[in-house]
Image (tube, rainbow, N blue to C red):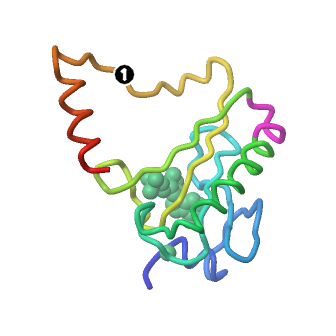
Amino acid sequence: MDCIFCKIVAGEIPATKIYEDENILAFLDIAPVNPGHTLVIPKPHYANFMELPEEESAVIIRTIKKLAAGVIKGTGAEGFNLTLNNGTVAGQVVGHVHWHIVPRFPDDGRVLWPGQVYQEGEAAAIAEKIKQQL
Ligand code: AMP
Ligand code: ZN
């Protein structure tokens, strides 16, 4: 399979690993938003979050919590962004599900998206559409 993260799991290309167990690997992002920016992946190939089985999601989230604590302490960050880009339209470039742990520092200038304003009735309408799909 032509997946760069599978190749990292297989040891075919190098990565700066910070954690590994039977099912999970964490390594530094090659183009960090801030130093210590960490990627966390399941070792098996799942293209995105929706394909990740329920049991594996639960375990990986628990592990991410531990890793985030390590990233915070190890970098001296004051906080972190935990992100997952799901789908090309959302900015997912590598098609192997992964979480980003991005350490954040005061005044680091990493500005997030601006919020928008709902028009009258718009929030209720979209909430209803979402609820009907649950
Ligand atoms: P995404 O846009 O959510 O798919 O994020 C993919 C991330 O993978 C980007 O932040 C890249 O910098 C990172 N990346 C791509 N190739 C490598 C690699 N060989 N080692 C470490 N990180 C990588
Ligand atoms: Zn893969």
Give the answer, above or below, for where 35 lies relative to 28: above
- Out of 53 and 132, give the one closest to the viewer: 132
Give the answer, above or below, for where 58 lies relative to 75: below
Q: Residue visible at 50% across and 70% down?
A: 53
Q: Position of residue 24 (x, y in %)?
A: 67, 69
Q: Residue visible at 42% across and 64% down?
A: 48
Is the CB–ligand 1 distance for label 1 below 8 Å? no
Give the residue furthest to the right.
73
Asked if residue 17 lies left or right of residue 123, the reply is right
Label 1 CA crowd tier, 10 Å (few <14, some 14–19, many 20+): few
Q: Residue visible at 47% across and 72% down?
A: 46
Q: Position of residue 132 (x, y in %)?
A: 24, 45
Residue designated by label 1: 114
The span picked out in magenta is 72-77
Secondary structure, mark 1, is loop
Amino acid at circle 1: Pro
* Quarter of the figure with residue 130: top left
Residue 74 part of the magenta segment: yes
Q: Position of residue 77 (x, y in %)?
A: 74, 31
Which quarter shows the N terminus? bottom left
* Quarter of the figure with residue 14: bottom right
Residue 122 part of the magenta segment: no
Give the answer, above or below, for where 2 lies relative to 42: below
- Out of 122 and 21, give the one closest to the viewer: 122
Magenta stretch: helix, strand or loop mostly: helix
Q: Position of residue 108 (x, y in %)?
A: 61, 24
